[in-house]
Amino acid sequence: MEPAMGMGLVALMGAAATVAGCSEDLESDIGSQSNPNSQVQLAAQVGYPHRIFNKAISGEPPSNAMYCAVGAGVAMVLIQSVNASPLLAIAIGAFVAALLNGVFSTTAYMGRNASQTRFNQYVYLDVLRNQLLSLMGHAYITTFCIVGLSYVMWHHDLIGHPFPFPVIAMIWGLAVGAIGSSTGDVHYGAEREFQDFKFGAGLNAADSGNITRFAEAGIRSSMDNAWFCSKFGGPVTGIAFGMTVFLDNWRSTAFSGWTAVVVGSAIVLALIIYNRQIETYARKKYGPYPEYAGDIEA
């Protein structure tokens, strides 16, 4: 494969990964499958019933790995059995994965809320109806992009990765879920669910479940979370995942052997130093951070 074509494919994969990361984070925010999901689950039990969709069946990495592996598996069967167009096969595979997302989201929401009726937490059919399609739509975009870039890596005339197609998609699904869980959640749980607490205050155990339940226009729903997260949390997750895919494939395409390893190590070291500088700036700008929330009152 020509170097120019290889770099073009790397750029295409990075762009697809950026879109996938953004849509994955927004999907998890709408469904409260992020790290703060335990606060949504606990809220009704401590006296804060709500209208936020909660579908946290598992963490984001394993669920996205399942969706992406299913999408790639369906696409691979269509390509190899009926000689379907790769683009059409990937689209159908992503659609099947989105349907699977809808099934799990529905059963999780209804089962969890029905079990909490004793705490005045109800099953809101309008919440289910309005937000389920949004969840499935974001899951479709994520799966389509991940399966697409996995196909580029797997096809023997392109990159020709030795791993099977569904395995590559599963690994990238794990990666996008992990990045969404670590990068995007900071701008959802800390800033959107706990607006009553000062920046850097942390969360005492006694305040667990004390989520903010009212948005700019009345009672909050998960769509309000998506509106908030699309401003920063979603895009920064997309950039993080896009950089991961692009920089990793760039170094392995532009270099070979130990040179690629050295370049990768240098990239990681540079990002660590830059991250430390950002943290130091934030502490000086908004700090000092208290050791625990009680220090603020003091």
Image (spheres, rainbow, N blue to C red):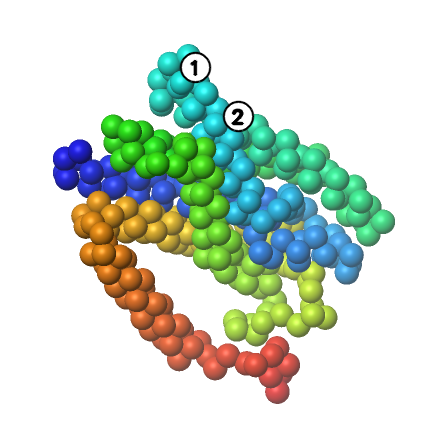
User: 239 and 225: which one is in front?
Assistant: 239
User: Which residue appears at 42% of the width and 12% of the height?
Assistant: 82
Q: How many marks?
A: 2
Amino acid type, label 1: Ser
Q: Secondary structure at mark 2?
A: helix
Asked where in the image residue 144 lies, by quadrant, the reply is top left
Residue 175 drawn at (x, y percent): 44, 48
**Residue 230 can be seen in this image:** no
Q: Secondary structure at mark 1?
A: helix
Marked residue nearer the N-terminal end (2 or 1): 1
> Callout 1: 10 Å neighbours few (<14), some, many (20+)?
few
Q: From the viewer's perspective, is the residue at label 2 or at label 1 nearer?
A: 1
* Disc ID at residue 81: 1
Does 249 sit left or right of 182 as displayed?
A: left
Amino acid type, label 2: Val
> CA gap, disc 2 to disc 1?
17 Å
User: 2 and 47: which one is in front?
Assistant: 2
**Residue 117 can be seen in this image:** yes
User: Which residue appears at 70% of the width and 52% of the height?
Assistant: 41
Q: Quadrant of the C terminus?
A: bottom right
**Residue position marked by numbered label 2 in the rendering:** 96
User: Which residue appears at 79% of the width and 48% of the height?
Assistant: 116
- Residue furthest to the top in view is 82
Asked where in the image residue 81 lies, by quadrant, the reply is top left
